[in-house]
Image (cartoon, rainbow, N blue to C red):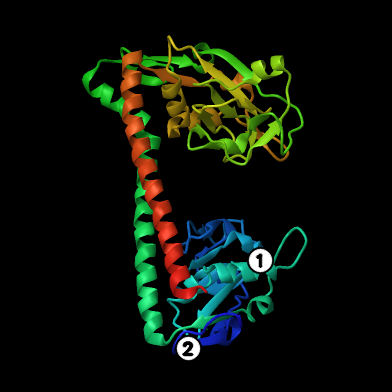
Amino acid sequence: MSDKTLKPNWKLVKFGDVVHQIKDRVADIENCGLTEYTRGEHFESGNLHFIGRSKIGDGQHGSAFHMRFKPRDVLYVSRNPQLRKVAVADYEGICANTSYVYRADRENLIQELLPFIMQTEEFVDYTIQHKRGSTNFYLNPSDIEPYEFFLPPLDEQRRIASLLWAADNVISRHQDLLEKVSLLKKSAIYNSTRRSQITEKLKKTGFGELPETWTAEPLGTLLEAVQYGLSMPLHEKGEYPVFRMMNIIDGKMVANDMKYIDLSESEFRNYKANKGDILFNRTNSADLVGKLGIFDLVGDYVFASYLIRLVAKKDLVLPEYLNYYLNSEEGQRRISAFATAGVSQTNINASNLQRVLVPVPPLAEQSQIISQLKQVDDSKQAIIEHIENSQEQKKQLIAEFLGK
């Protein structure tokens, strides 16, 4: 830190001199009077707010969960520091001993500024440089305490913290809006069906009551092709990018973190993803198996063996409608009914998948539903872009106020 220029009235301090690790150990978590706890998955990289909480006694917490935290405490996940998991507690609960509980000393550092100090690039770089382990990286408290940073006077701290929390609140409001829009999308197919029931006569089907102009069909009758992906070793480089299960995001195929493969011309033609193809994740954890996404990208892509290609009969069902329905809450419930648990993975084979019942409106109504849902998707994307821009602005503010 000696290469930095000290600002007027600022002072160089060590993390351990102005921040205290709180070691409030609970002897008996089941009888401590608290009802909730936080796990590692309740932290999100770069997000200062918990994204969930769990109930004590749910059977998910082990002996490591015995540290009490209180509202406004800053929790830091010490495993894999490159993940940048820091959050400000909004309730009193329990965390694992690998999540360090921190409070500012108040005499030199205000609590409101502490989480932003731990979001600076300098702090993250320091923790990554001082991590321990070869595969499962971690930090001891003593590894963090020597970290040095410039600390402004208390009045300046309050001003900076106020501005940074204002920026964070903008992000939080849009994240709440994004969650509401996502829920709207999940229920949109169901609501479209019910709106039709208001004006149309109903008929009994294996699906339940549907408008007279609708049918309920097994998925297999709506498909002209069902195909498992290629089962060959994948590489970091190669001629063709390969879709895997992690490339399914929010009902779409996304070209992130791609692997590659070299294929003959005939192999490529056999496994080439075509516009409107739906790729189905047939093997994964119980909460991820059954996810699917539609292909709508430009370029030559193929797909791996854990995915099944579904090709819609377009004279019966539009691929976009089918993809929306199968990704809806109702569609996912019907798919999960055919899931079978394996030793470490849950599976859905192609034969069972084709038994899933699908409500099929006339093509004109399918087009209307697609149009409505596309508006929801467009709104969702606009919110995501606004969040990303706000996060970048917040990052720049942190660097301006607290960085080098």
Front residue of this view, candidates 150 and 183: 150
Q: Up-down: is 373 above or below 356?
A: below
Q: Up-down: is 290 above or below 312?
A: below
- At a point 61% along the width and 56% down the height, the residue shown is 59
Q: What is the three-letter code of the residue carrying label 1?
A: Ile
Q: Secondary structure at mark 1?
A: helix
x and y, in percent, of residue 73 in the image: 49, 74
CA separation, marks 2 and 1?
26 Å
Numbered tag placed on residue 219 in the rendering: none
Numbered tag placed on residue 128 in the rendering: 1
- At a point 52% along the width and 57% down the height, the residue shown is 44
Q: Nearer the viewer, mark 2 or mark 1?
A: 1
Q: Quadrant of residue 239?
A: top right
Q: Quadrant of the N terminus?
A: bottom right
Closer to the N terminus: mark 2 or mark 1?
Answer: 2
Q: Circle 2 sits on which residue?
A: 108
x and y, in percent, of residue 87 in the image: 50, 66
**Is residue 287 shown left or right of residue 250?**
right
Q: Are marks 2 and 1 in contact (CB under 8 Å)?
A: no
**Is residue 180 shown left or right of residue 73?**
left
- How many residues crowd around disc 1 within 10 Å: few (fewer than 14), some, or many (20 or more)? some
Q: What is the three-letter code of the residue carrying label 2?
A: Asn
Residue pushed farthest left?
199
**Is residue 113 shown left or right of residue 31?**
left
- At a point 62% along the width and 61% down the height, the residue shown is 82
Q: How many marks?
A: 2
**Is residue 146 shown left or right of residue 106?**
right
Q: Up-down: is 155 above or below 66?
A: below
- How many residues crowd around disc 2 within 10 Å: few (fewer than 14), some, or many (20 or more)? some
